Amino acid sequence: PGLANVLGNVTNQPPVLGFIPDKTVYQGSPLSPTATATDPDSGQTKTFSLDPGAPATAFINPSSGVFNWTPSASDFAGDHFLTVRVTDNGTPPLSDTQIIKITVLTPPVLQLTSILHNGNGSLTFSWATQPQRTYRILYKTNLTQAVWNTLADVPSTGITLSLTDDTTTDQQRYYRIQLLP
């Protein structure tokens, strides 16, 4: 009951999507996981797609299963649910789906959160970060200088970073933090 009536043996079996874990991404940052699938019927072509309701700017490569989405500021912060589908080219074509949850976060404000004078001519400053992004720390000794000097490029593995700078050679320094692409 509820299934198609079939005479004889069913020759096509549905493909099976590999597990896609929940994802988290910041607005303005790219997300590109890859969907994988197997099909017990060897030689069949598998085509990946997103069901209706996916964000308008989200895309999945029909052949490779590579998913791409860079949530913009207009994509609300919070949980987004979308359905990934894989369909074979058997007769009849069969498919498998998985709903994945993508949590979109608002990026942290790019500003220093603390500055500590260490008493030995150095200072340590901290700022909120996005994991898996790189930050460039620049400085000037005078605001009239045309060029900022690069102090360091620092990759983030968590939600905050700290950097200690030896300022004994300068009477003053001005700092700038850049989020690199």
Image (spheres, rainbow, N blue to C red):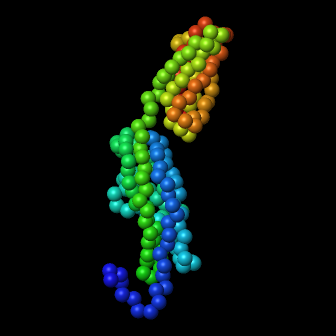
Q: Work out which residue is located at the far front of the displayed protein and give it.
A: 1
Q: Position of residue 66 (x, y in %)?
A: 52, 58
Residue drawn at point x = 54 percent, y = 70 percent: 38
Q: Is residue 85 left or right of residue 170?
A: left
Residue drawn at point x = 47 percent, y = 24 percent: 111
Q: Is residue 162 above or below residue 12?
A: above
Q: Is residue 162 above or below residue 171?
A: below
Q: Position of residue 59 (x, y in %)?
A: 44, 56
Residue drawn at point x = 50 percent, y = 69 percent: 16
Nearer to me, 101 or 52:
101
Q: Position of residue 147 (x, y in %)?
A: 57, 20
- Residue 140 visible in the picture: no
Q: Is residue 19 left or right of residue 3?
A: right
Please state, as top left, top right, bottom left or bottom right, where the N terminus lies in the image.
bottom left
Q: Position of residue 173 (x, y in %)?
A: 57, 13
Q: Is residue 109 left or right of residue 44?
A: left
Residue drawn at point x = 42 percent, y = 53 percent: 101
- Residue 107 visible in the picture: yes
Q: Work out which residue is located at the far top of the displayed protein and give it.
A: 171
Nearer to me, 105 or 151:
105
Nearer to me, 93 or 10:
10
Q: Work out which residue is located at the far bottom of the displayed protein and give it.
A: 8
Q: Is residue 29 above or below residue 34?
A: above
- The mark total stands at 0
Nearer to me, 148 or 173:
173
Quadrant for residue 84, please give it: bottom left
